[in-house]
Image (cartoon, rainbow, N blue to C red):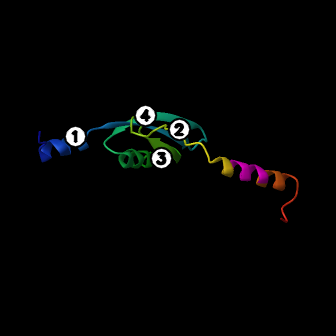
Amino acid sequence: MTVTAEAAVSAAQKSQKFTYRVRMRDDKIETGEATHTSRDGVIASLKRNQDIQTILYVFNPTAPGAGAKSRPKNPSLVASSRQLEFCLINGLDKR
């Protein structure tokens, strides 16, 4: 089965749904959804809005790998982190 170049381009230009969170000028946090062909397009359209102070995040919830759990840490790293925490809490920083 062969896919023509025109079909591949039309599939790449397909609109996707993105979730975003922004901080407004009045310091309220708002979450919403936008449909665009790319994440950069959503960010550009949010930047054009004068009421938005900061864009906190924009992501595609259906993208592969979105929301994947992180790997557990190596046990030796956890042990050394706890030892360092103990030393710092108890004032043993001149080690």
Query: Is there CB contact under 8 Å for labels 4 and 3?
Result: no
On screen, residue 93 above or below 49: below
Residue that numbered label 2 is attached to: 69
Question: Which residue type does callout 1 highlight?
Answer: Ala
Instruction: Check disc 3 and report its element: helix, strand or loop.
Output: loop
Instruction: Check disc 4 and report its element: helix, strand or loop.
Output: strand
Label disc, if present, on residue 33 of the rendered structure: 4
- For the C terminus, which image quadrant? bottom right
Residue that numbered label 3 is attached to: 50
Disc 2 versus disc 4: distance between alpha carbons?
Answer: 23 Å
- Mark whose residue sits in front, 1 or 4: 1
Disc 1 versus disc 4: distance between alpha carbons?
Answer: 21 Å
Label disc, if present, on residue 11 of the rendered structure: 1
Question: Which residue type does callout 2 highlight?
Answer: Lys
Instruction: Check disc 1 and report its element: helix, strand or loop.
Output: helix
Relative image position of residue 91 (x, y in whole percent):
88, 57
- Mark whose residue sits in front, 1 or 3: 1
Question: Which residue type does callout 4 highlight?
Answer: Glu
Task: Give the left or right position of residue 37, taking residue 69 as reference.
Answer: left
Q: Which residues are magenta?
A: 78-83
Would you call the spot at circle 1 few (<14 residues within 10 Å), some (14-19), or many (20 or more)? few
Q: Quadrant of residue 2?
A: top left
- Mark whose residue sits in front, 4 or 3: 4
- Mark whose residue sits in front, 2 or 4: 2
Disc 4 versus disc 3: distance between alpha carbons?
Answer: 18 Å
N-terminal-most mark, 1 or 2: 1
Residue appearing at x 42%, y 47% in the figure: 43
Disc 1 versus disc 2: distance between alpha carbons?
Answer: 29 Å
N-terminal-most mark, 1 or 4: 1
Q: Quadrant of residue 35?
A: top left
